[in-house]
Amino acid sequence: MLIALMSCSACSSWLASSPELYRAEELSQQERHQDAIAAYREHIEDRLTESKRPEWENPYFYLLRIGDLQLRLDDPTEALKSYEQAEEQKVEASLISDRYRAVAHWYIERDRLQEAFDLLQKYRDRDSLLFDAMLDRVGRALTEKETARPDSLPKATSPAK
């Protein structure tokens, strides 16, 4: 993201005028995720107090970056809180929908299929088409997993003596 922001002259001057954002991006690239999260929070607070902030700017957008970093830190619970807060603050809905699905994918990668399924059901109304496709895949995987477990098979009974 830092490279993309620095590629346009208007963006680079905006980035230069926001030391917290620049620092957050650098820390993120260095994989100093906790420090980057703190810097993003500082940037949000700074932008919220800016009296000449453009009307189109929503500083809460950076809650998405915070959530992404929290997910990298293997903390899906905190990531979800950040994404939900971004949603409450009117960050673009499609961006948030993608993040909810990313958390579900995080669960899937760790074979935590029931948690992925529950999360997808909870946020399904954000984009039913995309969520339903994932729900279908996760549901099938859950079913396969359940039917493959030896403890899910009926127990053989001993013949009567």
Image (spheres, rainbow, N blue to C red):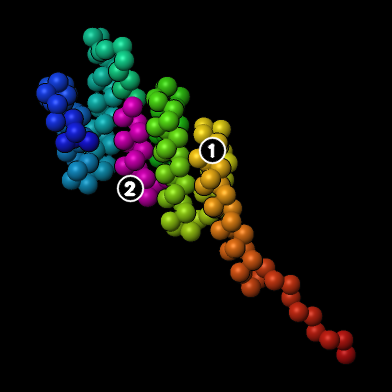
Q: Quadrant of the C terminus?
A: bottom right
Q: Secondary structure at mark 1?
A: helix
Q: Secondary structure at mark 2?
A: helix
- The label number, if any, that marks residue 129 in the structure image: 1
- State the image coordinates of residue 112 (x, y, percent, origin top left): 50, 55
* Occupied quadrant, residue 49: top left
Disc 1 marks which amino acid? Leu
Residue 63 visible here: yes
Give the residue pinned by disc 2. Answer: 72
Q: Nearer the viewer, residue 139 or 89?
A: 139
- Range of magenta residues: 61-76
| Residue 56 versus residue 73 in the image, above or below | above
| Residue 63 versus residue 137 in the image, above or below | above
Magenta stretch encompasses residue 65: yes
- The label number, if any, that marks residue 49 in the structure image: none
The crowding category of the residue bearing disc 2, from other C-alpha atoms within 10 Å (few below 14, some 14 to 19, many at least 20), is: some
- State the image coordinates of residue 128 (x, y, percent, origin top left): 55, 36
